Image: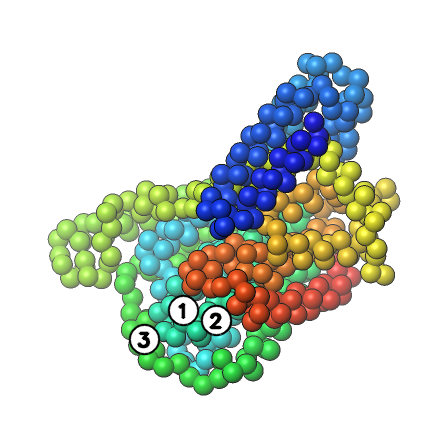
Amino acid sequence: METIVILVFVFGYLAITVEHSIKIDKLIPALVMMAISWALIALGIDSFTQWFDSANHALVDGFASLEHEGRLEWMEETLLHHLGKTAEILVFLLGAMTIVEIIDYFDGFATIKGFIKTKSKRRILWIFGFLAFFLSAIIDNLTATIVLISILQKLVHDRNVRIWYAGLIIIAANAGGAWSPIGDVTTTMLWIGKKVTTGHLFAYLFLPSLLCMLVPFFIASFLPTFKGKLENQNEDLTRPKNKYSATMLYLGLGGIVAVPIFKSVTHLPPYVGMMLALGIVATFAEIYSNTKFSMASLTSQDSDEIPVRESHSAVHHSLSKIELPSILFFLGILMAVAALESLGILFNFAGTLQDTVPTLGTEMAAPAGEVVVSDLVILLLGLGSAVIDNVPLVAASLGMFSQGIDNALWHFIAYSAGTGGSMLIIGSAAGVVAMGMEKIDFFWYLKNISWLALIGFLSGAIAFFFTRTIF
């Protein structure tokens, strides 16, 4: 039965990786393989000889001798445990996505356009690089990529030049998301899973992530594409469309940034702080949107200043715009990986991996009794994330390794999974959305951007070998 569960996961994941070829959204195979996996476990519960206790990260003693009722009880408790952990991540993401959509409702990201005052291609490259690096750490790398490419489309009219900028934005956004607990889904998973803390994440990964961005951008700045100046730059980029734009931008970003602080002070799960931030931002949004509605109904002058929406409720509009397919995909993939973890498959695979993969002469330190993890294993995980979505890879690592909070292993996983996806355009959510927005060809990216991403990834990894000695 274990073999059948593994095959269901393999075929389901294969369907996810080739979604563009089969024209089926990846959330569908994710949900199907999750449901089938747990159904197979329930039907064949008496045939399993081992069970993994995720709460204690160990195999359950005497599971093989339990009666049918006892096995079902373990399955139900485990399923509820994983659903709770997954729900923490999903509710957190829902709050963050809604805040970002509220900012966009008031055209808050238009404020960022005011930073761009030059026509130099090289200077614009660096401006977008740093914007992507720091913005992705606040609003996540996927949203930062969407925002910056939207601005880029209004600034750079030549598509052949623009796709170069877009490719490098992917590298910068993924690098920026790696050192922030709210910058990438996988880093958020590790943070909510109590594997990393905000302070240590910054100390370990800021310099490696920065080098992962700086090195490719430095090399790219000497390429012919980024020489000279832009033609026909739009001079009207900085004209505000909404008088509340800047206020909602700073309020929304401030609310998201305050979530790690809230967690540190109260020790409550991050989703609680995100819900508080959403509530505060939504309050101001409702006040401002009601004002907009009243003003628009009285004068035509203000209606030109503030975009007219179908509904004057900013919150309702924003909730209708969030990426619900992404939320359902995360639900499916995380619960499917949880099925493999519950059967002890990932736990056993971790031991096999350690026995077969050679070391690089340096290994992850681990306290007595813990498995020592080779650096090469984590580097391979980073390379794998370029081909396979990094969410299930990190979810699997949570079930494979037992190191404690803020162990260097978890920080290296956060770096490798977060930045390794830049090496292929399909390797990260930021890459996929850029591919869709600019119709970037897979092989064009492979030829022109992948080598830059690889150099950046390796540069950051080398830097991490030094920063991890801080603690």
Q: Residue at x 75, y 60 (%)?
A: 468
Quarter holding residue 347: top right
> Closer to the observer: label 2 or label 3?
2
- Secondary structure under tag 2 reads helix
Q: Nearest the camera: 99 or 264?
A: 99
Q: CA distance from mark 2 to mark 3?
A: 17 Å
Eyeballing the image, is 244 above or below 276?
below
Q: Position of residue 27 (x, y in %)?
A: 49, 41
User: Quick check: 298 left or right of 421?
Assistant: left
The quadrant of the rendering that contains the C terminus is bottom right
Q: Residue at x 28, y 44 (%)?
A: 313
Mark 2 lies on residue: 165
**Residue 137 in view, yes or no:** no
Q: Nearest the camera: 262 or 153?
A: 153
Amino acid type shown at disc 1? Leu
Eyeballing the image, is 150 above or below 78?
below
Mark 1 lies on residue: 152
Amino acid type shown at disc 2? Tyr
Q: CA distance from mark 2 to mark 1?
A: 8 Å
Mark 3 lies on residue: 234
- Secondary structure under tag 1 reads helix
